[in-house]
Amino acid sequence: MKELIQKYNRPSPRYTSYPPVPFWQNTPNEENWIRHLKTSYNPQTGLDLYVHVPFCESLCYYCGCNRTITKNHSVEDKYLELILKEWDLYQKKLGFTPKINSLHFGGGTPTFLSPEHLDQLIKALLKVKDQDFIGSIEIDPRTCQPGHLKVLSENGIKRVSLGIQDFDAGVQAAINRHQPVSLVEGLLEKINQFDFSSINFDLIYGLPQQTVQTVADTIKDVARMKPDLIAFYSYAHLPEKIKNQRLIKDADLPSPELKRELYETGKKLLVEAGYVDIGMDHFALPSSFLFQAQQEKKLHRNFMGYVDKKSSILLGLGPTSISDSSLSFMQNTKELKDYAEKLNANALPLEKGHSHTEVDLKVQQIILDLMCKHSVNVTLAELPDHLDVSRELKHFSEDGLLELNGHDIVVTPLGKTFVRNIAMSFDYHLRRQQNTTRFSQTI
């Protein structure tokens, strides 16, 4: 494993989309974007809605999300107006009110919004929803109030994801996120008073001051609380791109070898606690919806990670949100000021996008199959740079990372660790890139 890590640990996209954002081309204009949405919309399945809430009360040094740090909650009223104006513009331009298949809140900190504002926003967005509607939200345990939980439960937002990261006091000090175990345990007691269907914990390995022991202690605390799902993410240290990460000392970060040991330690303890490795840093109890989706070959991956139910459209509201029409991608403006200016001019706050080619869609499906099913059937000769792809797959096979059988490619248990590397072989945009985009390391 050590030799394989040395060989394959290199920068790579995380493939929550294909092509990755840095390689997007041919941005659709607003007219074509709306046309793509209309073409892909299926009234039976509706669309999936993502809402970005960019506000946080304090800065976490590791964070790479789009957010505004403020304790001034007077910004809430104006922000709700903007989100609802964007949603209203989409309805007018589409000519109908889409049915909502699922609604997900991310951030920033969605629970920055007061329970009253959250209730108002959810009700406005869910006037037409699927009978099997799924609602989920990211929660900061430090700002979540009982009122939030009541509003979420009453409005059908039954899946919650708690930002934990790490329970060690030294690590928390190094990332400026004080959040003791007792605080999370207290919140879980309140969550269990309502009928939420799923609880996820977000954890991060590779943070400053982490050791094998601190990770082991955190995992033991987490396993005792028994959330349904755990996302055990790799910290991507990119201080040249993310200014707040410069507040983290390089000397406090683990070496690549130690970082891998942190992951393997956490994974071993999670498996011992009854969790199943779903893939790409996600772990699930056998009773969870994500495990069931994997067993039924219904797992899907998008900008929000792994999901079990999807429509043909993912529509993002709020600054920096990304949408997927199945024919194209589109991202909103990143700055809140620009977002507001465009909406106040009655224009959708679009910034950049990508129009898919037939080859893009073919490679997209290959990468999705590799990451969700760990197998794919593909005719290599039909792909760009197929000789290079074939040669690289042969090397992966020789290293025991996959099995080749005719057109079938099967990722081995060992190969799951390197699935981003395997996906890279099919990424012709990456192979031909003309820029110097910096991605996080695969391991």
Image: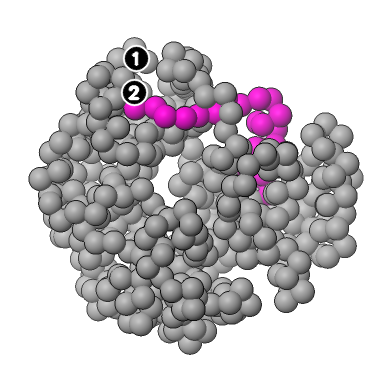
Can I make out residue 244 in this image?
yes
Q: Position of residue 204 (x, y in %)?
A: 46, 68
In the image, 374: left or right of 142? Answer: right
Q: Position of residue 175 (x, y in %)?
A: 36, 71
Q: Residue at x 56, y 66 (%)?
A: 276
Q: Which residue is mark 2?
A: 348
Nearer to the camera, 261 or 218: 261
Can I make out residue 227 in this image?
no
Count of residue discs = 2
Q: CA distance from mark 2 to mark 1?
A: 10 Å
Q: Residue at x 23, y 38 (%)?
A: 122
Q: Which residue is mark 1?
A: 93
Q: Quadrant of the N terminus?
A: bottom right
SS label for mark 1: helix
In the image, 18: left or right of 320? Answer: right
How packed mark 2 is, by other alpha carbons closer than 10 Å (few <14, some 14-19, many 20 or more), is many
Nearer to the camera, 71 or 214: 71
Write the start and end of the magenta stretch as one range. 349-370
How packed mark 1 is, by other alpha carbons closer than 10 Å (few <14, some 14-19, many 20 or more), is some
- Is 355 in the magenta? yes
Of discs 2 and 1, which sits in the foreground? Answer: 2
In the rendered structure, which disc, 2 or 1, sits on the residue that comes first in sequence?
A: 1
What amino acid type is highlighted by mark number 1? Lys
What amino acid type is highlighted by mark number 2? Leu
Q: Is residue 189 above or below residue 155?
A: below
